[in-house]
Image (cartoon, helix red, strand yellow):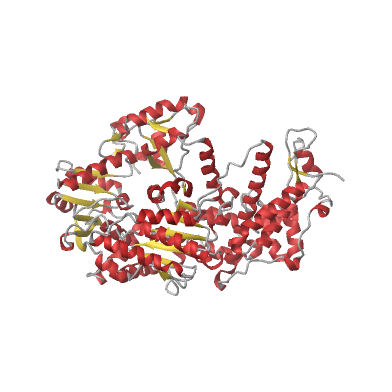
Amino acid sequence: MPQFFAHSTATPDRSDWQLLSDHLQAVGQLAAGKAAAFGGESMAEVAGLLHDLGKYSDEFQRRIAGDLLRVDHATHGAIQAVERYGPLGLLLAYAIAGHHAGLANGSETGQRTALRDRLRGIELPALLNHWQTEIALPEKSTLKPPALRQRRERHFFQLAFLGRMLFSCLVDADFLDTEAFYARLEGRASRRAAGHPDLRTLRAALDTHLAGFEADTPVNRLRAEILAGVRSRAELAPGLFTLTVPTGGGKTLASLAFALDHAIRHGLRRVIYVIPFTSIVEQNAAVFRRALGEWGEQAVLEHHSAFVDDQSKALQARDKLRLAMENWDFPIVVTTAVQFFESLFADRPSRCRKLHNIAGSVIVLDEAQTLPLKLLRPCVAAIDELALNYRCSPVLCTATQPALTAPDFKGGLQNVRELAPEPQRLFRELERVRVKSAGRLSDAELQRHLSEREQVLCIVNNRRHARALYESIAEAEGARHLTTLMCARHRSQVLAEVRQRLRDGLPCRLVATSLIEAGVDVDFPTVLRAEAGLDSIAQAAGRCNREGRRPTEASEVLVFSTENEEWAPPRELVQFAQAAREVLRQHPDDPLGQAAITRYFLQLYWQKGERELDKADLLGLIERGRLEGLPFETLAREFRMIDSVQQPVIVPWDDEARDALRALPFAEGCGDLARRLQPYVVQLPRQGYDALYNAGAIQPVASERYGEQFMQLVNSDLYHESFGLHWDNPVFVSSERLCW
């Protein structure tokens, strides 16, 4: 009887090649184990058994032996799934057909051939009947889908979600079995992390850390109360939660304590933190590692686009981290909202591979109000589905809780429980500022406000306004400017100077864009905030009297509009500002209270309209497509949380940056140097990047080795001590392309 192989080696007698039947059975078993968290074992096993069925062909066996043939080895399994299992088989067919190239649309051709066309019209190599003697498939009557609790208006969304989860189980199992086969051949153990600390060990370490805190001030006593109250709710059944805690209430460690308690109590597997900003991902991951002591490095996986290989660690440890990022096999994962939500709507194996490990998790959605409005309804649908059918406990964690519950929000969240003890009282007791309207201010009046106050922060809505305003007060003592056009190391230096001046009671007048609101720890007696959304105003208020050392009445957040049309809010912020203006008028005495915040979000969603909360009509596409037309590829293409692609430019700001840049052409590997250079990167819109590139102001470093991976600013005149990267040099004045 002939032998059929899944993977080959260089051994001519094929004695160490992997048998196809061994691979299919192993992938089936692995996939079933991964689907157990959501009851999908039966379907996942069938997907594993069928995924490489097309390798039972003469053409593929010739290819694996070295013939230069292109062979479709996935479609045969998809066809068998449909023929044997009907509608359930069709759902499996998406995963099987796409386990290498990615999930295709059901009926509309995109970059990939539609599944319908693959099932009907493609000429395939003949399938040899030997497979039926080696692979035993279950009967149709025994194929059991997960017992999904249904949302009638999202029936096909739920099926698409299940299909992507099964796809995740399949591709991860396929990767792992293939990886293990070649690891055995090389006589080495898997490089994947093993022996993670369990959640009970991590909780014990966190308890030790928390025991060192003293409730020695009114704020610290309130933080201790919040921590105890949140932890007491861990007994509640898994499902949807909110954690509504004012800025400075200690929600970071309180949410981690709840997550560990809750996961242990209910047999959940991991904790996933989803955070909107990369800088806060890094910050929170560092906080968690410190809090978990000796277990921190082994327990916390940090996954975001700016993560770079740390060459100071042993090769084995670096490999484990890199491999863990592929499937999130860690007790605690800290990632970005972009990474999390785009993966939930992705189509490629590399992005979807980790999804099954989300099932059975506590998911803390930090700063939940920052979810983009154009994708809000699909995001809410995904959060709801994870809680409803995948044993997850999502926690919407913020000081400004968005109004996402049904029936006020169509298709909204149901049965949501609050974790914080008496949020309204907490907000009253932690109230540290007064928010007032300063009305309409001219540039001269705004300049006068800044000049008359010795310590003041002014936050505006665009970089050009921030620069102009700073230039108008630059001669004043303690004037400082912050912008994203400065590299992170430069911004850190400015913030260190600002904090020191504030501590020493010296004059400090800081002009910044909204970047200052992203978790930056500064404490001003007065904050001026250009009109924006109420959530942004609340974040600005978190930079005023942050530690409660001043009387509330003496700590002001002044919200102003500008007379100069040139400084009007960007178009996408106008509706946010309009909704905030209306709510501030209705709630003048408590503009940051829970009633005002809820009213603000409801007003904003009403202004936007239902269609604008799913701008690409993704939910509609799914429901209209039905099972046979699920638009997997279209969803992945259209679900983009960030519209504009940013391009990194390295600024040789100090000796460390210059040394790393000089070493880059000669380094054996670039990982360590990339990590060292990360604080010197400025992200530019494509338009500005191209303009600087065309002008020769930026050039690649070691292009023969790295191409354009590392782009360096070579015209030092374009980087200013106060403004960061700019283009006021006379050489560029006439180039409108540089003024974006």
Quadrant for the C terminus in the image: top left
Horizontal and vertical percent position of residue 265: 49, 65
Left or right of 269: which side holds 24? right
Left or right of 552: which side holds 162? right
Q: Quick one: 163 or 118, which is closer to the camera?
A: 163
Q: Is residue 497 above or below residue 159?
A: above
Q: Residue furthest right?
A: 1
Q: Is residue 143 above or below residue 17?
A: below
Q: Residue at x 42, y 61 (%)?
A: 373
Horizontal and vertical percent position of residue 580: 30, 64
Q: Residue furthest bottom?
A: 407
Horizontal and vertical percent position of residue 395: 43, 63
Residue 400 in view (yes/no): no
Residue 165 in view (yes/no): yes
Q: How many marks?
A: 0
Q: Residue furthest top?
A: 666
Q: Quick one: 604 or 365, which is closer to the camera?
A: 365
Q: Residue at x 62, y 50 (%)?
A: 172
Q: Residue at x 58, y 53 (%)?
A: 347
- Answer with the quarter of the image where residue 184 lies: top right
Left or right of 679: which side holds 542? left
Horizontal and vertical percent position of residue 389: 56, 66
